[in-house]
């Protein structure tokens, strides 16, 4: 305890002084432990980030075959990313192939000219020019629906709802169905007034639709882009739910696609047009590439084109140009490989042709270039990092990328 002496000077009891000193030492020790802990956490984060960056920046030149499964060769088989794995479809049916290359299930269907689209864990396969549409989930078949008119095109949303362009003699229909085949809405258009529907795209939530129509007005070409909203905003807009549109002269726009739930791309023979569409469409950006594109590709992070290389030295056969979702160029990439297919997701672009493959990441770095022993039919990422499902003429392999000493 503190006490006052007769000189009016305060003296502190030695035990109190010791207690205060101990408290200060304890506080200092606690601060040291906390700072040391924070330093350890910071170092761990730096190590993890360093490993992540190193893995992302790593280039590979070899493979390890994780699993191989024999398959029956069919020249007309086509492949599509489905869930985290692969959908295989032919005129005779549909199969789901998992990350090990094994066939999980098969559904027998009769498609004369099969077309297919997928979103998330749902896929839809239709008979172009026919009437049959089949909906699939990763667990297997969900429904089959017979359309009242000939099918021109289809698209599917992440919850399994799908849209179909149907064609009769003088009228076109754009119908939306739930995954069980129950009709949600129907739009009727006149070929004489609206033109011929080229393509449709459904938003991820299934509430928005973007269409491209082509019309020959005498000797003039016109292309119209039309946006529909089937949520509250569209219901309040007008009876047909149309919330906006754009018209183009002397321009052909065969492909439209929701890149995200709120961003749409329209690919013309002259340029790429980008639109915001949270509720109604508005111009977001565009890029002119001068035509002559031999391929287009897109993902939720970027989009791009491949063109023949017209440079005078002609050291590479093709130039790939990649843009962000506002139309700003990210990079050019020149390559000489003769290719047949191109696949892209949020992280990379996979190009295949003959028995060769080329993987380019979203920054423009060559991640992998390889020549297989057999002709490649399809190559997509599996659900595991740096693993891919590769289909050949008589087998399907799951391969893991690795680095080998040259």
Image: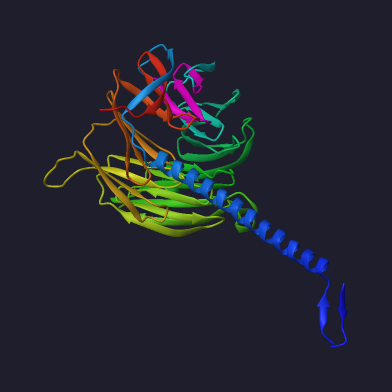
- Residue 128 appears left or right of 13: left
Q: What span is in magenta?
A: 77-99
Q: Quadrant of the rendered structure where residue 141 is?
A: top right
- Residue 216 appears left or right of 106: left
Vertical order, 210 against 183 (above or below):
below
Pinpoint residue 379: horizontal percent, then vertical percent. 39, 27
Pinpoint residue 114: horizontal percent, then vertical percent. 44, 25
Vertical order, 116 against 49 (above or below):
above
Q: Quadrant of the rendered structure where residue 71 is?
A: top left
The residue sitting at 14% across, 42% down in the picture is 314
The answer to whether residue 249 is seen in the rendering is no
Pinpoint residue 333: horizontal percent, then vertical percent. 27, 44
The answer to whether residue 369 is seen in the rendering is yes
174 or 195: nearer the viewer: 174
The residue sitting at 49% across, 18% down in the picture is 93
- Residue 145 appears left or right of 388: right
As for residue 85 lying within the magenta part, the answer is yes
As for residue 125 lying within the magenta part, the answer is no
238 or 349: nearer the viewer: 349
Quadrant containing the C terminus in the rendered view: top left
Quadrant containing the N terminus in the rendered view: bottom right
Pinpoint residue 74: horizontal percent, then vertical percent. 38, 15
């Amino acid at each position: 305890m503190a006490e006052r002496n007769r000189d009016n000077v305060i003296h502190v009891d030695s035990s109190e002084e010791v207690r205060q000193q101990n408290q200060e030492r304890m506080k200092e020790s606690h601060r040291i432990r906390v700072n040391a802990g924070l330093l350890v956490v910071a170092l761990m984060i730096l190590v993890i980030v360093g490993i992540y960056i190193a893995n992302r920046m790593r280039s590979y030149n070899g493979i390890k075959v994780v699993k191989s499964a024999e398959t029956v060769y069919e020249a007309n088989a086509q492949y599509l990313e489905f869930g985290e794995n692969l959908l295989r479809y032919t005129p005779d049916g549909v199969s789901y192939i998992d990350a090990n290359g094994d066939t999980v299930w098969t559904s027998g269907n009769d498609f004369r000219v099969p077309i297919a689209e997928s979103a998330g864990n749902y896929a839809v396969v239709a008979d172009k020019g026919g009437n049959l549409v089949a909906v699939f989930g990763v667990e297997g078949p969900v429904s089959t629906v017979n359309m009242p008119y000939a099918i021109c095109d289809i698209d599917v949303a992440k919850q399994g709802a799908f849209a179909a362009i149907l064609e009769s003699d003088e009228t076109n229909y754009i119908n939306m169905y739930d995954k069980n085949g129950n009709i949600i809405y129907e739009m009727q258009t006149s070929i004489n007034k609206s033109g011929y529907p080229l393509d449709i795209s459904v938003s991820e939530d299934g509430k928005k639709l973007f269409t491209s129509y082509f019309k020959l007005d005498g000797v003039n070409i016109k292309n119209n882009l039309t946006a529909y909203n089937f949520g509250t905003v569209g219901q309040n807009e007008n009876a047909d739910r149309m919330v906006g549109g754009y018209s183009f002269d002397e321009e052909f726009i065969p492909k439209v696609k929701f890149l995200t739930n709120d961003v749409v791309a329209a690919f013309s023979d002259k340029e790429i047009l980008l639109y915001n569409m949270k509720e109604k469409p508005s111009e977001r950006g565009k890029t002119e590439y001068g035509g002559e594109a031999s391929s287009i590709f897109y993902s939720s992070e970027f989009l791009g084109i491949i063109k023949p290389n017209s440079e005078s030295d002609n050291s590479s056969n093709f130039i790939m140009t990649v843009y962000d979702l506002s139309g700003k160029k990210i990079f050019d990439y020149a390559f000489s490989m003769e290719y047949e297919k191109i696949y892209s997701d949020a992280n990379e672009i996979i190009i295949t042709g003959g028995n060769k493959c080329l993987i380019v990441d979203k920054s423009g770095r060559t991640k992998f270039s390889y020549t297989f022993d057999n002709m490649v039919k399809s190559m997509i990422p599996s659900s595991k990092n740096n693993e891919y499902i590769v289909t050949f003429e008589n087998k399907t392999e799951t391969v893991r990328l690795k680095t080998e000493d040259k």
